[in-house]
Image (cartoon, rainbow, N blue to C red):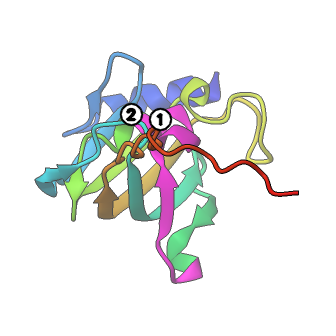
Amino acid sequence: EASAKWLEGIAKKSGVEKTESGLLYKIERPGDADTIAVDDRDVVVVNYEGKNRKGKVFDSSYERNEPAEFPLNRVIKGWTEGMKLVGKGGKITLWIPAELAYGERRDIGANEALEFSVEVVDVKPYVEPAPADSTKVAEPAKK
């Protein structure tokens, strides 16, 4: 309930947009529209800081002094959706409802809405692996 009220307040702020799923976001810098994640299997290289609604930082690539790299199908739903809104060099703030974040699990707190500030360092488009060459016949095992 507290998270829902917090998100309602955020939604009223200038420049904050809302997606159909309920993700709130503000594009701080759009980045390169030609280098943007479009597939859930794309990999993003990012610098980010994650905070709970009370402003407590629970995760930060800045503190580790190293960007993080994630395939979009291996992160919370709010990230998968949000990272497709900005390109390489872009910066976005995401306010993620619990159902698009960690839900009831996670030591951050059950059913907590979260805030992430994310800078996209790079986008690596997913490349379909080449099919195995079926023309090669396996050699029989030698005895």
Where is residue 140? Give x, y as percent. 72, 48
Q: Which residues are magenta?
A: 64-80
For the point 39% across and 45% down, which residue is it?
A: 130
Observer-nearest of 3 and 117? 117
Q: Amino acid at mark 1?
A: Gly
Which residue is denoted by mark 2 in the rendering? 81
SS for tag 1? Answer: helix
Q: Splitting the image into 4 quarters, where does residue 31 fall?
A: bottom left
Image height check: is 1 above or below 35? above
Where is residue 22? Give x, y as percent. 41, 21
Image height check: is 106 above or below 43? above
Q: CA distance from mark 1 to mark 2?
A: 5 Å
Q: Splitting the image into 4 quarters, where does residue 113 fall?
A: top right
Q: Are marks 1 and 2 in contact (CB under 8 Å)?
A: yes
Observer-nearest of 42 and 138? 138
Image height check: is 100 above or below 86? above
**Can see residue 37?**
yes
Category of crowding for the residue at label 2, using alpha-carbon neighbours closer than 10 angstroms: few (below 14), some (14–19), many (at least 20): many
For the point 59% across and 35% down, which residue is it?
A: 101
**Can see residue 75?**
no
Which residue is denoted by mark 1 in the rendering? 78
Question: Where's the C terminus, which quadrant?
Answer: bottom right
Image position of 106 (left or right of 135): right
Residue lying farthest to the right in this orientation: 143
Q: Amino acid at mark 2?
A: Glu
Question: Where's the N terminus, which quadrant?
Answer: top right
For the point 38% across and 46% down, which residue is it?
A: 42
